[in-house]
Amino acid sequence: MDVIDEKRVARRINFREAVRYELKDPAYFKGCVAYDLSETGVRLRLAEFLPLNTEVVLNLTLQSGQTIECMGRIVWISQIPFMDNYQAGVEFSNPELLFDARRQIKQLVACS
């Protein structure tokens, strides 16, 4: 995985993996693809528009094959030019619930 050079609080890595996400209703779930990942958030490619501050539950599969569940909210979203898809930034929330997941993501980023 290549490191994306950006001026951010947390180091980001390329992370092209399938992601399962759900909204408040667990019966509503969909899949998408991640673009990059840090210990504070993830950038997704979505087939639908989700309003800012929409809360999502994400299931990410790490390189180890382990799936982790993260809660977050949409902090930015933009339409991909000439497509019906969107890019969205999800900021992880509830850090106390994410301690183990963030530790695993931090370890993945550090090793890349």
Image (tube, rainbow, N blue to C red):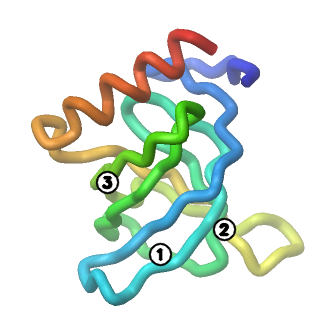
Compare marks 2 and 1 and give the one earlier in the sequence: 1
For the residues labelled 2 and 1, the Cα–Cα distance comes to 9 Å
Q: Can you give x and y, in whole percent of width and height, for residue 21 in the image?
A: 44, 68
| Residue at 38% in and 26% down | 104
- Which residue in the protein does label 2 denote? 86
For the residues labelled 2 and 1, say whether their Cβ atoms are less than 8 Å apart.
yes
Image quadrant assignment for residue 24? bottom left
Which secondary structure lies at badge 3?
strand
Residue 62, horizontal then vertical, whole percent: 53, 38
Front-lying residue, 65 or 19: 65
- How far is mark 1 from mark 3, CA to CA? 13 Å
In the picture of the structure, the residue carrying the numbered disc 3 is 72
Q: Secondary structure at mark 2?
A: strand
* Residue furthest out toward the left: 96
Residue 18, position in %: x, y?
Answer: 63, 57
Q: Which mark is residue 50?
A: 1
Residue found at x 52% / y 46%: 61
